[in-house]
Image (tube, rainbow, N blue to C red):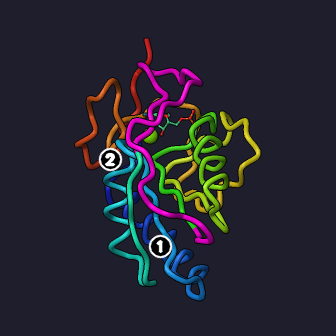
Amino acid sequence: MIPYRDIISAIEKVAEKLNNDLKDVECPLFLSVLNGSFMFAAELIQRVEVQSEISFVKMSSYSGTSSTGKISQLIGLNKDVKGRTVVIVEDIVDTGNTIEKMDTLLREAGAADVKVCTLLFKPDSYRKDVKINYPAIEIPNDFIVGFGLDYDELGRQYRDIYVIDAE
Ligand code: IMP
Ligand code: MG
């Protein structure tokens, strides 16, 4: 569905926007949501030119190809976010359950500003009010794998993105 070179050029564009928007922000924190965003986070952070930190949290909401709506935090936040700008780095925003939960958690923990950067965004599936500030690629409501995204933990290692053929 999306070849590697198109993924990389979308990431380059998002990094350029972030470099511009964050240039006057003191040490923003990039917060990568595991597992799915590990490849995106690695490619993105190499292109970030502002002084910043990166950290990781692990959330889980999916079982098979449908969002359960129940989000669990498997590895929590171990950074003080008080007064800081936090950029959430997600693989994909689908219904928005995960991103809404993250946004709430970070604001409750005292973050001064929370921005959302996601490799993939399914606008037709999104049902929340949290603003998706940096969507690299918008896609229809297909279920996809590759470039970090999985189907029941398989397919994460592919460098291109594929659609799962639903039968
Ligand atoms: P949401 O909470 O419904 O927005 O879903 C977010 C999470 O579900 C993402 O971080 C992914 O881990 C997973 N997810 C949603 N859509 C897909 C997909 O098409 N392929 C693989 N994982 C997906
Ligand atoms: Mg995920």
Q: Quadrant of residue 68?
A: top right
The amino acid pointed to by label 1 is Ala
Residue 147 is labelled as 2
| Helix, strand or loop status at disc 2 | loop
Image location (x, y in percent) of residue 30: 46, 65
* Other-residue count near label 1 (Cα within 10 Å), few / some / many at <14 / 14–19 / ≥20: many
- At 53% from the left edge and 30% from the top edge, which residue is drawn? 71
For residue 15, side relative to residue 5 (left or right): right
The amino acid pointed to by label 2 is Phe
- State the quadrant of the N terminus: top left
Image location (x, y in percent) of residue 38: 33, 52
Judging by the rendered image, the residue that carries numbered circle 1 is 15
Image location (x, y in percent) of residue 87: 54, 63
**Contact, mark 2 vs mark 1 (Cβ under 8 Å):** no
- At 40% from the left edge and 59% from the top edge, which residue is drawn? 6
Residue 154 drawn above or below residue 47: above
Residue furthest out toward the bottom: 24
Residue furthest out toward the left: 157
Residue furthest out toward the top: 167
Residue 73 drawn above or below residue 113: above
* Other-residue count near label 2 (Cα within 10 Å), few / some / many at <14 / 14–19 / ≥20: many
Q: CA distance from mark 2 to mark 1?
A: 17 Å
Main SS class of the magenta portion in the image: strand
For residue 114, side relative to residue 28 (left or right): right
- At 34% from the left edge and 33% from the top edge, which residue is drawn? 150
- State the quadrant of the C terminus: top left
Q: Quadrant of residue 151?
A: top left
- At 52% from the left edge and 57% from the top edge, which residue is drawn? 88
The magenta stretch is 58-85
Image location (x, y in percent) of residue 65: 46, 21
* Disc 2 C-beta below 8 A from ligand 1: no
Q: Is residue 151 magenta?
A: no
